Amino acid sequence: MESAGRVNSVEFMNIEDGAHVNPNGPDDQSASASAHTVGQDSWKQVGFMLVTCFNCGYILSYSSLVMVPLGWTWSIIILLVIGFYSAYANWLLAAFHFIEGKRFIRYRDLMGFVFGKYFYYLTYFSQFMSFILANMGFILLGGRALKEMHLAFSDSTWRLQYYIIFAGVAYFLFAFLIPTMSAMRTWLMVSAVITSAYVILLIVMVVDDGRSNKNANYDVGGSQVGKVFNAFASISALIAANSGGLLPEIQSTLRQPAVKNMRKALVTQFTVGILFYYGVTVVGYWAYGSSVSWYLPQQISGPKWVKILINLLVFLQAIISQMMFAAPVHEALDTKFLDVEEKLHSGKNIKRLFVLRALFYTANTFITTAFPFMGDFVTLVGAFSLTTLTFVFPSMIFLKVKGRTARIEKKIWHWFNVFAFSLLTVATSISAVRLIVKDVTQYRLFADA
């Protein structure tokens, strides 16, 4: 690999040595050590986190977002292909947690070291847009679950916006009290129990509905042009289902050997974890066909208490899951504004921590109340940045770091990935923008969607 001296303006932290490594960039800009825990967690803890957080309430929309635009045959093909590629790309990226004896605890630092300042900021922007949009989706999801619970008790005239605010407050309190990924440790078992409970209960109810629904229609509607755009939008949603674009940040929490441990956690996600959200996706489409709701609990029949329980579990689980996807944003803010030599909840840091979390969730909650379109959040996240972060950048890193010594067939393979998924990024982004424009014409600001 070429010398790092000409490609970077950021000082990196070599966690293994406990020392700073300056790549002698054009600007001598120093970076602080992380305010969050590094190198302390077991692979089992991270595996639990991946399984539960990727099986958040978002999975309740995948039947509608992923399978309805594609139909049975193409849905199954795309599910398998994207699942395989996601597992492979994350497996590959995990290997580059260390380069030239340096440990990269942030994706943006890794890209900046390998490709320079432009890619540092591009990765920074892409990641944070994904995390912020995903967090808005979580807030909307929590608000929807609360509203469905309330409607089960009464014919409430409360607008969705009130429930969104309640969800935002709950997420803020959790993020304030449990400020880092590592601090989620004691909550992951709770999350696993809640996840298993609502997924199993939901599948039982959906299967029961499917058995009685003998006239489910699986036709893919719309014009030919519309079908193509909707198909790319469904691919975007599926990419978001399998990857969060934050693997280096998650890997940073692992104790040594970090690469081996990260791959063990990935095996857990793409075996146990994927069975859950793929299972819900397929069963939901089988039961209701093309008329499946974007929020499955809204559609299931059965006793009232079942709907209430499922929505309650979805809400509680989302409080925990949203933290993983928001943690890199919190880490950046905490490292910038807190005293990293003090504990996060020390007397010196507690006020600033409160303000940082409050500002983050207040802004996200306000925007979510104005644009309550959850499907758009999922699609835009997958299209705008996750395709690049998940599929394009890892192959680019391979070609840069190992291109001189790699066999020709490996070079061809990774160049194919770079070009193919770059084109997919463009196509899915166009589809996502088209979907947003369509929804903007159908909904007003602060719509009670």
Image (cartoon, helix red, strand yellow):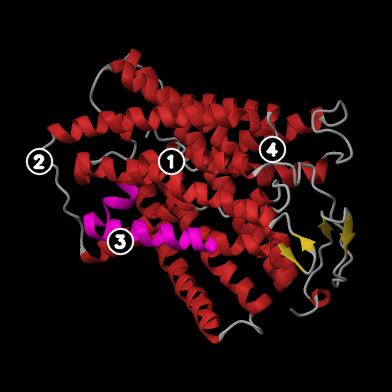
**Nearer to us in this view, 381 or 99:** 99
Q: Residues within 10 Å of mark 3 (few under 14, many from 20)?
A: few
- Distance, label 1 to label 4, CA atoms, is 23 Å
User: Do the CB atoms of the residues marked 1 and 4 lie less than 8 Å apart?
Assistant: no
Q: Main secondary structure of the magenta part?
A: helix
Magenta segment: 64-89
**Nearer to us in this view, 325 or 43:** 43
- The numbered mark, 1 or 4, whose residue comes first in the sequence reads 1
- The numbered mark, 3 or 4, whose residue comes first in the sequence reads 3
**Which residue carries the number 3 mark?**
77
Question: Disc 2 on helix, strand or loop?
Answer: loop
Q: Residues within 10 Å of mark 4 (few under 14, many from 20)?
A: many
- The numbered mark, 1 or 2, whose residue comes first in the sequence reads 1
- Where's residue 213, x and y in %? 13, 35
**Nearer to us in this view, 319 or 399:** 399
- Residue sitting at x 66%, y 39%: 181
- Where's residue 321, x and y in %? 54, 36
Q: Which three-letter amino acid code belongs to the residue tagged 1?
A: Tyr
Q: Quadrant of residue 287?
A: top left
**Which residue carries the number 4 mark?**
182
268 sits left or right of 112 in the view: left
Question: Disc 3 on helix, strand or loop?
Answer: helix
Q: Quadrant of residue 307?
A: top left
Q: Which three-letter amino acid code belongs to the residue tagged 3?
A: Ile
Q: Quadrant of the C terminus?
A: top left
- The numbered mark, 1 or 3, whose residue comes first in the sequence reads 1
**Which residue carries the number 2 mark?**
215
Question: Disc 4 on helix, strand or loop?
Answer: helix
Front tag of 2 and 4: 4
Q: Quadrant of residue 367?
A: top right
